[in-house]
């Protein structure tokens, strides 16, 4: 490979951390479950999510390159006083709670993969992996392990893509499902889960934090290629899951589909790949929560109080880790918890996207050259609007169930949630125009 080819490849490898972060047990579970339940009709949610991830991650990285501040620091400097403290607590609370929700799925996914591979009980395995993740975070050596495990996850993703091709799905249905939005009855939670497992809110802070020293052309090329490849893998998982239509979804039937096309070795590889996806994410999610908290609360001009070995930094990642560990040792069923965790993060997405939209339209941070243009603003507003519609839809659905009301009609529900989302979005747009 020549120098030019290597220069083009390095940004992709650098930003592949984002794809590795969202391809975890949540992606495998939510995508495959969507395919098993609704065939190819929810592929459009992954198309939207992939485009939204590229758009939002580019904006978060551009903020760092242009302003020299990561997203957390930018938010802190934009909102000061009592109001600013309230905003910071809201953001850090939402991100840390979102990381904790992901962590529950990570620990459960890692334990379930190891259980399938070894036959040992899941609860002791969850405790083992949780303690091992904590030890790696304590000594500050998680990156090497996460990288090695991510390679296993990448090979598992290739297995899904190859299997998806070998299944020979009807091309017309796959294309239609990828571009035409459909809302089958009862699919709302899975749609929100597909968005939440791809457009990961804490990844915006993670991506912004690692963008220092990159050029705009490098981040745009690297993010686009890495995230699109991750989205294609997610679509492949959904297509493989569609082969389970008519069966109750589970990891063992999913592994059997892989084995039928690739050979018996694929079942064991899937089991260990599921473990690797969960364990690597069990390291990165607590770390991302602590990095987010540091960006929001560390004073850039004052003494360093949020170092990697400080009690503040460790307290954040420990809290997230213990939350996930509690679910793991409680012996709860992994699949429902994982899907709910992805859906919860889908609800948090509009909050993170709104703050990012405000930040990249702030002239004090971005200067004239780095500000969002009309096209970028239109696309980002569209992402916020769609994510708001999906989030409000599920909140309204949950509210009706809590009050004992009959399930509302799907079309009426989306019309009502769309109207509510527009009302919520109006002050956001006004705020952007005033900046």
Image (cartoon, grey):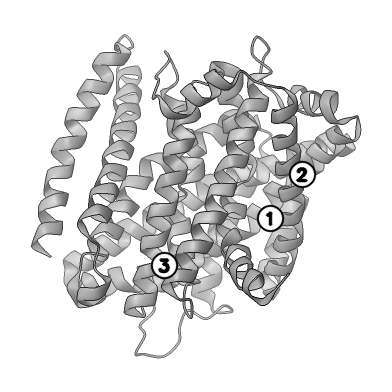
What distance separates the C-alpha of mark 2 from that of mark 3? Answer: 30 Å
What distance separates the C-alpha of mark 2 from that of mark 1? Answer: 10 Å
Element under label 1? Answer: helix
Residue at image point 61% right, 46% down: 23
Relative vertical location of residue 407 with respect to residue 81 in this rendering, above or below: above
* Mark positioned earlier in the residue sequence (1 or 3): 3
Q: Is residue 182 left or right of residue 10?
A: left
Looking at the rendered image, the disc whose residue lies closer to the viewer, 1 or 3, is 3
Residue at image point 18% right, 73% down: 363
Which residue position is annotated with label 3? 61
What distance separates the C-alpha of mark 1 from that of mark 3? Answer: 23 Å
Relative vertical location of residue 48 with respect to residue 228 in this rendering, above or below: above
Which residue position is annotated with label 2? 273
* Mark positioned earlier in the residue sequence (2 or 1): 2
Which residue position is annotated with label 1? 280
Q: Is residue 274 visible?
A: no
Looking at the rendered image, the disc whose residue lies closer to the viewer, 2 or 3, is 3
Element under label 2? Answer: helix
Q: Residues within 10 Å of mark 1 (few under 14, many from 20)?
A: many
* Mark positioned earlier in the residue sequence (2 or 3): 3
Element under label 3? Answer: helix
Q: Residues within 10 Å of mark 3 (few under 14, many from 20)?
A: many
């Amino acid at each position: 490979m020549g120098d030019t080819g290597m220069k083009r490849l390095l940004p992709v490898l650098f930003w592949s951390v984002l794809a590795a972060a969202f391809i975890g047990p949540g992606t495998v579970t939510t995508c495959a479950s969507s395919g098993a339940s609704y065939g190819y009709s929810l592929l459009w949610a992954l198309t939207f999510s992939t485009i939204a991830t590229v758009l939002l991650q580019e904006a978060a990285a551009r903020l760092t390159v242009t302003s020299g501040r990561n997203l957390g620091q930018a938010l802190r400097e934009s909102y000061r006083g009592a109001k600013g403290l309230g905003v910071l607590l809201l953001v850090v609370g939402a991100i840390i709670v979102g990381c904790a929700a992901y962590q529950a799925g990570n620990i459960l996914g890692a334990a379930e993969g190891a259980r399938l591979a070894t036959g040992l009980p899941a609860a002791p395995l969850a405790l083992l992996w949780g303690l091992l993740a904590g030890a790696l975070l304590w000594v500050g050596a998680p990156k090497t392990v996460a990288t090695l495990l991510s390679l296993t996850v990448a090979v598992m993703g290739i297995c899904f893509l190859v299997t998806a091709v070998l299944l020979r799905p009807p091309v017309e249905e796959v294309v239609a499902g990828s571009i035409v939005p459909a809302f089958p009855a009862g699919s709302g939670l899975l749609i929100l889960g597909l968005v939440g497992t791809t457009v990961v809110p804490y990844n915006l802070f993670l991506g912004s934090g690692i963008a220092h020293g990159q050029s705009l052309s490098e981040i745009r090329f690297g993010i686009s290629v890495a995230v699109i490849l991750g989205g294609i893998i997610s679509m492949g998982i959904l297509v493989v899951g569609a082969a389970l239509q008519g069966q109750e979804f589970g990891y063992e039937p999913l592994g059997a589909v892989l084995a039928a096309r690739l050979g018996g070795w694929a079942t064991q590889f899937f089991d260990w790949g599921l473990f690797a996806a969960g364990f690597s994410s069990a390291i990165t999610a607590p770390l991302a929560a602590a990095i987010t908290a540091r960006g929001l609360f560390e004073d850039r001009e004052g003494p360093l109080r949020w170092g990697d070995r400080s009690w503040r930094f460790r307290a954040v990642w420990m809290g997230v880790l213990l939350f996930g560990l509690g679910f793991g040792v409680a012996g709860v069923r992994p699949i429902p918890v994982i899907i709910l965790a992805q859906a919860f993060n889908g609800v948090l997405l509009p909050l993170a996207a709104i703050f990012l939209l405000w930040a990249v339209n702030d002239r004090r941070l971005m200067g004239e050259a780095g500000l969002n243009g009309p096209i970028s603003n239109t696309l980002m507003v569209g992402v916020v609007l769609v994510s708001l519609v999906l989030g409000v839809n599920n909140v309204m659905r949950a509210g009706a169930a809590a009050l004992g009301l009959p399930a509302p009609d799907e079309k009426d529900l989306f019309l009502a949630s769309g109207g509510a989302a527009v009302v919520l979005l109006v002050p956001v747009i006004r705020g952007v125009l005033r900046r």
